[in-house]
Amino acid sequence: MTATITLPEKVEMKKTREGFGRALVDLGEQDPRIVVLVGDLSESTMVHFFAEKFPDRFIQVGIAEQNMCGIAAGLAAMGKIPFFATYGAFASCRAADQIRVTVAYSNLNVKIAGAHGGISVGPDGATHQAMEEISIIRSIPNMTMLVPCDFWETYKATIAAAKHQGPVYLRFGREDVPVVTSKETPFTFGKGEVFAEGKDLTLIACGVMVYEALRARETLAERGYSARVINLHTLKPIDRDLIVHAARETGAIVTAEEHQVNGGLGGAVAEVVVQSAPVPMELVAVHDRFGQSGKPAELMDAFGLRAKDIVAAAEKVLERKRVR
Amino acid sequence: MTATITLPEKVEMKKTREGFGRALVDLGEQDPRIVVLVGDLSESTMVHFFAEKFPDRFIQVGIAEQNMCGIAAGLAAMGKIPFFATYGAFASCRAADQIRVTVAYSNLNVKIAGAHGGISVGPDGATHQAMEEISIIRSIPNMTMLVPCDFWETYKATIAAAKHQGPVYLRFGREDVPVVTSKETPFTFGKGEVFAEGKDLTLIACGVMVYEALRARETLAERGYSARVINLHTLKPIDRDLIVHAARETGAIVTAEEHQVNGGLGGAVAEVVVQSAPVPMELVAVHDRFGQSGKPAELMDAFGLRAKDIVAAAEKVLERKRVR
Amino acid sequence: MSPEALSASDLEAAHRPGRLTWPIERLKDKALHVRRDIITMLSKSQTGHSGGPLSCADFGTALFFNELNIDPKNPKWPERDYWHFSIGHVTPVIYSLMAERGYFPLRDLMKFRAFDGHTQGHPSAHDTPGIEVSAGSLGQGLSVCNGVAMAARIDHHPRRIYCVMGDGEQQEGQIWEAAMFAGHYKLDSLCGIIDYNRMQIDGDVESIMNINPLDEKWRSFGWNVIPCKGHDMADVLRAFAAAREHRGHPSVIIANTVMGEGVSYMADDYRWHGKPPKPEQADEALKELGTNYLEWSARLLAH
Amino acid sequence: MSPEALSASDLEAAHRPGRLTWPIERLKDKALHVRRDIITMLSKSQTGHSGGPLSCADFGTALFFNELNIDPKNPKWPERDYWHFSIGHVTPVIYSLMAERGYFPLRDLMKFRAFDGHTQGHPSAHDTPGIEVSAGSLGQGLSVCNGVAMAARIDHHPRRIYCVMGDGEQQEGQIWEAAMFAGHYKLDSLCGIIDYNRMQIDGDVESIMNINPLDEKWRSFGWNVIPCKGHDMADVLRAFAAAREHRGHPSVIIANTVMGEGVSYMADDYRWHGKPPKPEQADEALKELGTNYLEWSARLLAH
Ligand SMILES: Cc1ncc(C[n+]2csc(CCOP(=O)(O)OP(=O)(O)O)c2C)c(N)n1
Ligand SMILES: Cc1ncc(C[n+]2csc(CCOP(=O)(O)OP(=O)(O)O)c2C)c(N)n1
Ligand SMILES: [Mg+2]
Ligand SMILES: [Mg+2]
């Protein structure tokens, strides 16, 4: 689906996790089956909005992610639609075995919310900067995964997760990030969205990197290149057709993610590309190193997760495309 | 490194995990720093050989994989070289957070042994067939990962893991598998081994699939194709040069692994290929589904993990190579 | 085994929806049949666990034929009680109880762990009707039951929830997370049953990783603790009744059992945790259990 | 603050290798300095945790200046005792204790959580000399200490091992796996300290997920339990001595503390778990602690 996005000079900043918190409240009003669980992180995950409105359907589990995941499974087995929330590092790692065996193998209708994904988490440092989630969740059968790019998309992704029958993992960040979509921007579970057309190469991004990709596109345009921008908010199931068309039509791809390079968005796209339309790719990501403390902006710069890094990767891939 | 392997009609069958168990005993004799931990699975992981010889350096942890991982970290911090053993499903998932934060982020000298990897685990069924290990471990910084192909290579991989300074994850299987290497076959941590030369395409495999790849090569030879076979026993760090040369020189790649297709060996190779030498690839793997009970042979057939499946993938990739 | 044990009326009685309240003698009969099923299916499959399933056979029979309010033909019956075996490896006893109670034909037991059967090595919600949540990774089941109990609380549903755990399994930290949760929320609809057979894979629980004093642990986590003789049907029924009547705390029944109970050469020997009897050993076992492979496998295949 | 508090002799005394055995008055002085460090570094960083670090300040000071046998200038000194904060989020008190004891310059505290500092938001073995194992994911530390204790046992090394845990952290199952292990192996070289400040992020531990009766839990897991007044230096020293003398079981000190202790407007308020004081709030706090930002940041930057 295409929804051409053009960014204003000054973009509104808002937290993705707030989109999650707001959506839960709306879901709670529409559907009595919605139950929310949290592991002693009500405000950071913004489930406190839901907790205030629906105390009877809110479950405080304390600091016990494994148990929380199993409780959600039991609730789902009884027909509830449970969302459990904690930091992504603990949702994806501390509860990995419970997600695999109890949730995914049973194919239960559990929604997992991983807050604080990516290096932009900032001062808390490496332990709290979840950057392995995509690799872990992608590898588990029956799991699906959404990585929305801003406040509105996180809101929609949360609604879509509730509507989808089966386990879903939602990844979002900590900081205010540019709002690039609007209430009206289309969102389809399982499909990527073309946010800008282009013919020379394709930038495929998820999460906050979608904004950086759109900015990179502007710079590339100035340099005479037309870059297609795809917002791949659904990491699993992956939108093969969209990726294959982009590879065939533009002949070069740059992926951008706030995640480890091994097995993440770049890896997922590479797997599709080599099986259908092998083209040169560059992967903008965290290159197999742990995060650290610092201001989010400092870290995005230091870890090479900026528009300028996407531009550099784009020029490299365009060069590779030419000399092939 | 090249060590041309030609298979006899009848190949000796032996358990990879036995190579692990034997190597631990030899290590225990050579190095007093070796300590072995187990989570109530002494015989299945074959650490009982070590336990009998070195009871003072053997630690029975009971059924507590998280604790076992942390204990290993503490031992390593004090200069020991701990190996902890359990089934791969529980080593990679139940202890994922402990591996990430305590072991990998501290970059401690912990060796993790995941037994029962792959669909060939057989009758125990899905929960015990670890097929997400490569994706999970690859995504964690500082981790390294070895997936040896047979008894001898598992023996060598275990020795190499002890010599390597830093965390290592070893993956091996449950059943008797063909012994394709010998005591003399070279093994270098971090390097793939070319087991057979070829120019039309390259088969890259790990674990028991190396045998299937060598058999597939014979069939392909009969059909007039010369296939290079690479045993990529080290999944991380990955041998980029070897893969890139194979891609450039043969122009087509088939990967084969007893693992989920998302983020596994195929994904790792695809990531390298798209960044350096985009060529057509086919991925022989478990296609994002859980395992099931059955005889190992039945399951290898049913899940398409046989030489004939590699041959089919090879013919497909050769066709794609031709029409490019 | 008496022929009428398989009469239409007998099947009807065993498969009847709702809560059965069979007398002790009849429960003992059924428990004997369950042990015969276990040995027979293991003899056929030549893969799977013997020890734990046999130690669970008596309280398992009491649970399915005297305690649970279920409709085997309609596993998702809204009124149902919920049962869950957190020790997924005891599938022989789980499947035997399910088949004897009518969830699926007895003949399915003869495909235990087979490629073309639904009776997987570990309980699979994907494959077996009546298995609501998969298991096989130890320590996860009590959390699931917490969730089921919380759902019942939200819906003001009278459902009771039963979770079978192992004694070695008590070593998993998640058990204690779940225990703390149930204690905190006073989930008295929840009843845990621990198969205290004193053994696990590598040997005696006490020497591998001592879990004692187990009753004090559970009490300190806010539970009502009910010790019982796990192979004394009357005492098992007493324990279930006590749990059912207790208000204000979740209850846990510590069932003192013997691994391999019912087969002399398996009894109290941890080496039988995870292996099946060889056919000739199975014959010996079935003889002790008052039948033989031909007769009992015929019974299974006929229904 | 007395000027000689920073004399060369004072520094030498505080940084001296081996086990210090400071008198109570001196420990109280140091604990006050630690609280000043905590507020000052948080005021500078404007990110990080206030509540837990302040509740750990007194027993933390006793641990570093009266109990631990360490050589700050030589963190890997083979003779060293091992200390570990499983509650990685209390880095302000950890780094203050480390710097006051001489692991690294006090000025490094002014780079807390900064891009160009080594004092990471959570303890990082990769960045900070003296941090041997990273932390930040709750519940993992006691297992690490089990490993250190087992290594000492294998080597017949007299090393003592100290693990600081939180009360909310007790909700993590891994704590109980580790507790069971230490009890089983009777690791009496191991001493746990629980910062029982009765609060966690979302509120009171008792209402979030009750961990009581905590002493009975630990006793039932095979530990020697030592309650103490966590802000009464004499009682803290008594508790450490009792742990040191006890044989045959690991000991756990349940330190009854107050979150935010030492700063009136933070005390006993869970909302101060994870946020720093604003500069003006820090001034108020430092005033209560007998100094001011200018003076104390100068002290830190000067060493
Ligand atoms: C998380 C996890 N770790 C290890 C195993 C392997 N395992 C299966 S059964 C078992 C022993 C369980 O002991 P117990 O609970 O006493 O059951 P019993 O041996 O009495 O049947 C182990 C270690 C597992 N299934 N799951
Ligand atoms: C595994 C894990 N889950 C959640 C968190 C987030 N977290 C950090 S501190 C904290 C509360 C800890 O409570 P307590 O142990 O009482 O420490 P205190 O609040 O008293 O400092 C939580 C939930 C974490 N760091 N690790
Ligand atoms: Mg047992
Ligand atoms: Mg607290």
Image (tube, coloured by chain):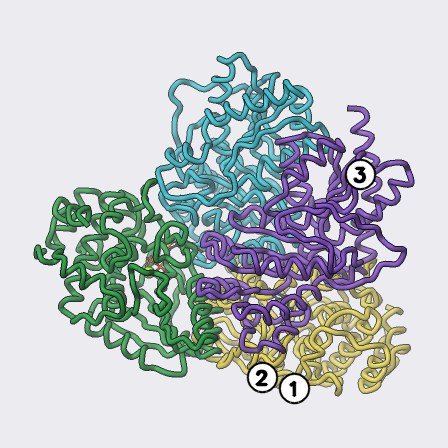
Chain colours: A purple, B cyan, C green, D yellow
Return the x and y of residue B170 as percentages of the image width and height.
Answer: 53, 42
* Mark 3 crowdedness (10 Å alpha carbons): few <14, some 14-19, many ≥20: some
Query: What subunit carries mark 1?
Result: D
Amino acid type of the residue that numbered disc 1 sits on in the rendered structure: Asp
Which of these two is toward me, A178 or C143?
A178
Which of these two is toward me, A128 or C154?
C154
Report the disc number at residue A135: none
Return the x and y of residue B46 as percentages of the image width and height.
Answer: 41, 44
Image quadrant where one finds the N terminus of chain B: top right
Residue holding disc 2: D228
Distance (Cα) linking label 2 and label 3 = 69 Å
Amino acid type of the residue that numbered disc 3 sits on in the rendered structure: Gly
Residue holding disc 3: A198
Return the x and y of residue A187 as percentages of the image width and height.
Answer: 68, 53
Image quadrant where one finds the C terminus of chain B: top right
* Residue at (85, 45) in percent of width and height: A308
* Mark 2 crowdedness (10 Å alpha carbons): few <14, some 14-19, many ≥20: many
Amino acid type of the residue that numbered disc 2 sits on in the rendered structure: Cys
Q: Residue furthest front?
A: A184
* Residue at (65, 54) in percent of width and height: B106
Distance (Cα) linking label 2 and label 1 = 8 Å
**Mark 2 on the same chain as mark 1:** yes
Q: Is residue D3 left or right of residue B103?
A: right
Query: What subunit carries mark 2?
Result: D
